[in-house]
Image: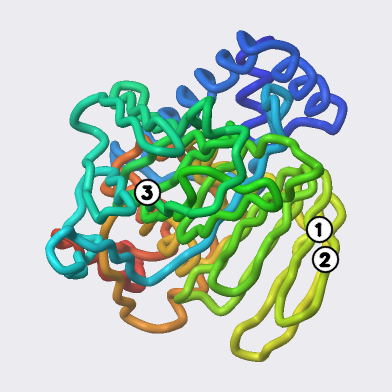
Amino acid sequence: MERELLHKYFRGETSAEEEKQIMDWAEASPENHAVYLKERKIWNAMLLAPAIAGKPVRENKRVRLFRLWTYAAAAVCLLAVGISAFYLYSDKGQQPLDLQQISEPTLLLSNNEHIVLNRESFELKGKMATINNDHEKKELSYLPQKEEAARPVTDTVMNRLVIPHGKTYRLVLPDSTAVILNAESELTFPSAFNAQIREVTLKGEAFFQVKHNEAVPFIVHTEQLDVRVLGTTFNVSSYADETLLRTTLVDGSVQIEQNGETHQLRPSEQYTYNKQTNTKETHTVDTDIYTAWVNNEYIFRNAPLSEILTQIGHWYEFQTTYETPSLQEKRFSFTIGRDASLDQIIRFINSTEEVYIERMNTSIHIKNKQPME
């Protein structure tokens, strides 16, 4: 695949025929996929270079990221659910610890023991499962004990995996479902699933590869709604400090259960719930925007500045203030990798001549950009 054609695609300038050509090539093999990701990183670096040098940058009006799901052996589920604060309990009288005090991915066992996962690999044998941690791969696995796997689960032993700012971790559940937890996220799950249902509770954002089992449904519980997986790829966004709750279906089928009502979605449909007005809508959307983080990217298309800063705020820790409320509605379109620093992103936004962002430690202030004399 020619590099110029890929970069043309990243700029959003390819035709429908060219987009299909690139998509077919990238999905043809893991090697092609790796080349695509490498070129995307190069493109991100090129995008940032003018901003770092202090030169004006032209925004891309159209940016695309195609879906590369063919390598998933199981149904893939994307979930993004937000909270304003996270807590876990210490082993001393269950005293709450603010997430700000947690700097590494941490596992909280049912006995309230805390284990920091990034420090070392280990193996723990429990009654229902063996817990393996590979700190180099950033992967935690729950392997059912063979003698217990065939027995019905009578006592549910719950565990919590908590991820702070700027970190991710991979979790393999007892049924072989794989989960990648994003920054500022938490998953509560059992050491073993029962024979009737598989249930987990999510706060934050996670990428799910759900092991297909028609006889035992997989349900993700969130603060506002439940998502029943029927073999599908989807994204859920339910941040506590945002007005809109969104469930976006990429492929397959999901069932939304909310306040006694059931809503079935078709591919490329998005279900939205407005918490202020209590209104619900279903409409067709471009699903690429809601899955970009899996490839370690952010994609924004005509997105208001307030939404952009909220999204990147889960990866970079900062507080935001605005000179005037209208600045929150300034809109931008760009794609950028999460390997970029916060200062690089700020310099890029500043170079667009729309606003000016000042940073002081963990606080950023957005002002109207003054015209050059």
Residue on which the image places disc 3 = 161
Give me the C-alpha separation between circle 2 and circle 3: 34 Å
- Name the residue located 69 percent from the left edge and 11 percent from the top edge: 29
User: Label 3 is placed on what type of residue?
Assistant: Leu
Which numbered disc, 2 or 3, marks the residue that appears first in the sequence? 3
Which numbered disc, 1 or 3, marks the residue that appears first in the sequence? 3
Q: Nearer the viewer, residue 50 or 283?
A: 283
- Name the residue located 36 percent from the left edge and 48 percent from the top edge: 345
Mark 3 Cα shell of 10 Å, populated few (<14), some (14-19), many (≥20):
many
Mark 2 Cα shell of 10 Å, populated few (<14), some (14-19), many (≥20):
few
Give me the C-alpha separation between circle 1 and circle 3: 30 Å
Residue on which the image places disc 1 = 269
User: Label 2 is placed on what type of residue?
Assistant: His
Residue on which the image places disc 2 = 283
Q: Position of residue 234 (x, y in %)?
A: 70, 49
Which numbered disc, 2 or 1, marks the residue that appears first in the sequence? 1
User: So how many labels did they put on this image?
Assistant: 3
Q: Considering the numbered disc 1 on the image, is that residue within a helix, a strand or a loop?
A: strand
Q: Nearer the viewer, mark 1 or mark 3?
A: 3
Q: Which quadrant holds residue 24?
A: top right
Q: Considering the numbered disc 3 on the image, is that residue within a helix, a strand or a loop?
A: strand
As displayed, is residue 301 above or below residue 129? below
